[in-house]
Image (cartoon, helix red, strand yellow):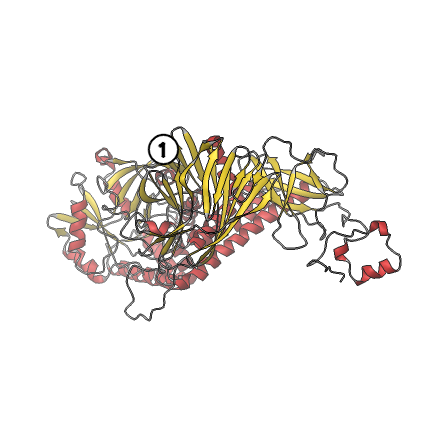
Amino acid sequence: MRVHMIANAHIDPVWLWPWQAGVDEAIATASAMADRCDEYADFIFTRGEAWLYKQVELLHPELFVRIRELIERGQWHITGGQFIQPDLNLPTAAGLHRQFTHGQRYFGEKFGISPKVAYNVDSFGHTASLPDILASHFYTSYVFRRPEQHQTALPANTFVWRGTGGAEVVAFRIEPGYVANFADLSGQLEIAIDAADPQLGHTMCFYGVGNHGGGPSKAMIDWIIANRNYDGHELVFSTPQNYFDAIADKRNLLPTVTTELQHAFPGCYSVMHDIKYAQRHGEHLLEQARRAVDAFAADDAEKAAQSTRLDAAWEDLMFTQFHDILTGTSIPSAWDSVRAFQGRARIIGEEVLLHTTRRWSYRALPKANAHQVVVVNTATQPFAGYVEGEPYLDFDDWNARWICDENDNPVPLQIVQPESNQLIPRILFHAEVPAGASRMFRVRDEPAPGGERPERGHELVATSTRLSNGVVEVRLRPGGIAAIAIAGSAVTGPGGVGIHLREDTTDTWTFHTDKWSEPVIDVLSRGDWKVEEQGPLRCRARLDARLGNTAIEWWVSLYRGESAVRMELRINFGERFRLLQMPIDLAQAPDGWTDGIADGAVDRTPSPSEWPFLDWSRLDAGGAAIALTTTDLYSHSIDDRLWQLTLLRSPKMAWGGGEPQTYAGRDHHTDQGVQRFALTLHLGAAAGEGSIAAAVSQAADPLVVFDRYEGMNRPAWGPVPPRGLWGPAMLRNLEAGRASETDVQLESGGLFRRPGHDYAG
């Protein structure tokens, strides 16, 4: 058998060290490997990830020139073609595509190379749609390490992997690992040979110091040269591409695998929630900004300028997709920088979205002597649903105002609590907005013509024990939801929907199990629900409670005409070695389960095992359906009737289960502090494929809502301000008779108002 010896140096730019140390290790490793290439004429080094080459190009241009020369003479091999080795479960589809688009573009521009072998040797699982994503970027092969055989049994370590969309790549699972920290490679080599299929006549064996860089030592290279014929096997310095080329004519011998490659470290699906939250929302924001540019930019020049900005923002988020960042397994000091990378990307996304939509509005929308509320739908799906906005009324209250559409038709609305405690009202109204288009509503203060109130038919009911919109009914109990039903048919069983704390003594990764089997130690059973809203468009109740050391605010809302239960959570988490979950007791055990993944969906079999998902999940039970959509939850399990959504975990950070040699008892735990969640349960017909797609689109591309005053004679309330805005100058005008008593509004507007007080004193 010919053994292709693959010289590599796995580099974690962030893990047990901050990103600055990752840059240092990248430069040092590249320099050392360039020296090894010069010292050994037939030695070949394999290195991927555009991020690393960018650091070399920026900080050590002379070394970058050396690498280019080594590539040209065949001693330095670029594989992978990605920006970095990311996590492959948690990024959005757009985020994963960007990894390959940006990486391939960089290698093409700098070296004239387009790698065909994708390479993620340390990622903690691989989504079932990855072959389809790879094939769309013209990859033919894939190299990975995890999951190991005891986590996911495979028929061979070289196989054809077929994605959920039907595309295929030839995949190779590394045995026994990509790192070798010893000069005698006998054990590494023998395990690699044992795992190989003799029919192929070829296999790969990876060697080199790694994780914090390094690469093969001289002693390793000398050992290979001295053992070129090892027990009848030929050892050759080689590359992954050479291996796949060598077995290309034997593809018919390879088994086909159609499953996802999962259950390496399921604790990574949920730990460090705030990092995952910022990443998911940030990736959606950048993709929304791109769509806005495509739909609303004035010309190609504006599109090019804004796309360049978005490319730069994506490089920050592609970096934070790295498999020891997004999975939440790095040291405490790394996270401030990670949040800064994510924040820089977010601000660019917000700026591009604002600049593009506002420039468009100045070009396209007419001026009017009226307060306008502009609603822009950047999504590729039409929007039909509820809109919230806070029209600025020059510090006046909403009072009897109303809104109309472009044809002067009154639009039903509901006044709800604003974000600020003073000065700004907030309204909720229904709108339909075509894909890639806009609507313009006007705020009116003259007497309404009637008809702006919702018609009767779907009555909202809100009490401390019950919410109903005439279609969906939610029964509330102290500390949770007692029952959910649609059209009188039960969705939940006796357990309803709750929140509990489970003991979790597993490490940060959860190395040794794929399920949460430790006991539940506390259940939220205290706290009464308070009604916040009673319609006419939305009813809502809130629960304030404590569970262990954690404060929980839980909102449940029903909207008029919707077959859905919307929930929000704000949790101030203060636990140690605890897992926070939302268990849902289903009325029936599901006979079908489908989870959303990047660019697709995967069917799964209910079991206690924890699984990652992306944006949505759908269950079928006895012909009835229930679906979940959320951008804020990332893993769950379904076992018989018990559906458990994992919210938060609190192991020590970057903790494998032991203690450092010097230990003073100081620990940092994950997920501490305030965390936010929004999720929607879609019931009946609303859990259909089209409805789920629309809900996912709305969550990923929230409407852009803004006030517009072009052409308006402000302020809207005329020559005399509301009573609460009177200051010394206004009081003097009144005393001098400069303002008519008929102009005075006695009970409106105002700053920091309290009973018996106002701004005027």
Rendered-image quadrant of the C terminus:
bottom right
Front residue of this view, candidates 621 and 655:
621
Front residue of this view, candidates 129 and 480:
480
Quadrant hosting residue 94: top left
Where residue 4 appears, as percent x and y from the top left, is: 22, 48
Front residue of this view, candidates 295 and 648:
648
Outermost residue on the left side: it is 231
Rendered-image quadrant of the N terminus:
top left
| Residue at figure coordinates x 75%, y 34% from the top left | 449
| Residue at figure coordinates x 64%, y 34% from the top left | 454
User: Can residue 260 be seen at all in this image of the molecule?
Assistant: no
Depicted 42 relative to depicted 363: above or below: below
* Left or right of 185, for residue 82: right
Where residue 641 appears, as percent x and y from the top left, is: 36, 38
Secondary structure under badge 1? strand
Amino acid type shown at disc 1: Gly
Front residue of this view, candidates 456 and 654:
456
Where residue 104 appears, as percent x and y from the top left, is: 40, 46
Where residue 500 appears, as percent x and y from the top left, is: 39, 50
Please give the residue where the numbered disc 1 appears in the rendered image.
592
User: Can residue 61 be seen at all in this image of the molecule?
Assistant: yes
| Mark 1 nearby-residue class (10 Å; few <14, some 14–19, many ≥20) | some
Quadrant hosting residue 653: bottom left
